[in-house]
C-alpha cells in the first residue's frame, strides 16, 4: 500500500504544523504530496479578457513526505511512514496498532 489520494495526514512541521488534511495528490517520485488547505501559496492570475479582473488564488504547494504523518484509519493515531525503496512505493505500517494502512 502507498500514500494515496484521500488519506488523512497530520502536518508535523512548517507553518501548518498540527493541522490535518486530506491528500489531494501524491507525487511519489518526488516524495511530496499535496494536502487540501495546507501549505497554501498565493498565485496571481492575470485577466484573460479585457474588462476582467486579475485574481489571487491560493493553491496548495507540495509538502515533503517527511513533514507529515499519516493518520491510521484503524486506531485514529498519527503514525510515521515507512519507505520501501526497493519497490519504489511507500509501505505504511502503523507504529501504534501495527496494521498496514
Ligand atoms: Zn493504527
Image: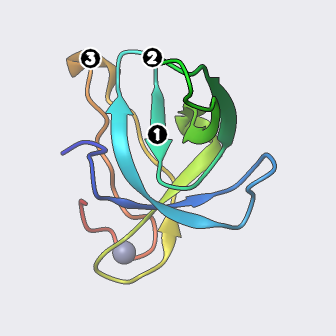
Q: Quadrant of residue 52?
A: top right
Tell me which residue sits at (55%, 39%) in the image. 59
Query: Which quarter of the figure is the C terminus placed in?
Result: bottom left
Residue 77 rendering spot, x and y as whole percentages: 48, 77
Which is more N-terminal, label 1 or label 3? 1
Residue at image mark 2: 30
Dot 1: what SS?
Answer: strand
Residue 47 rendering spot, x and y as whole percentages: 56, 22
Q: Quadrant of residue 26?
A: top left
Q: Residues within 10 Å of mark 1 (few under 14, many from 20)?
A: many
Residue at image mark 1: 34
Which is more N-terminal, label 3 or label 2? 2
- The dot on residue 86 is 3
The correct choice, above or below, for 17 with respect to 68 in the image is below
Q: Position of 72 compared to 79: left or right?
A: left
Closer to viewer: mark 1 or mark 2: 1
Amino acid at each position: 500500500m502507498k500514500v494515496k489520494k484521500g488519506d488523512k495526514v497530520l502536518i508535523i512541521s512548517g507553518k501548518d504544523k498540527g493541522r490535518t488534511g486530506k491528500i489531494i495528490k501524491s507525487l511519489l517520485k518526488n516524495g511530496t504530496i499535496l494536502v487540501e488547505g495546507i501549505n497554501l501559496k498565493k498565485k496571481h492570475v492575470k485577466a484573460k479578457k479585457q474588462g476582467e479582473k486579475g485574481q489571487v488564488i491560493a493553491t496548495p504547494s507540495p509538502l515533503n513526505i517527511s513533514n507529515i504523518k499519516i493518520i491510521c484509519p484503524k486506531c485514529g493515531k498519527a503514525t510515521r511512514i515507512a519507505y520501501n525503496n526497493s519497490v519504489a512505493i511507500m509501505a505504511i505500517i502503523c507504529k501504534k496498532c501495527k496494521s498496514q494502512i
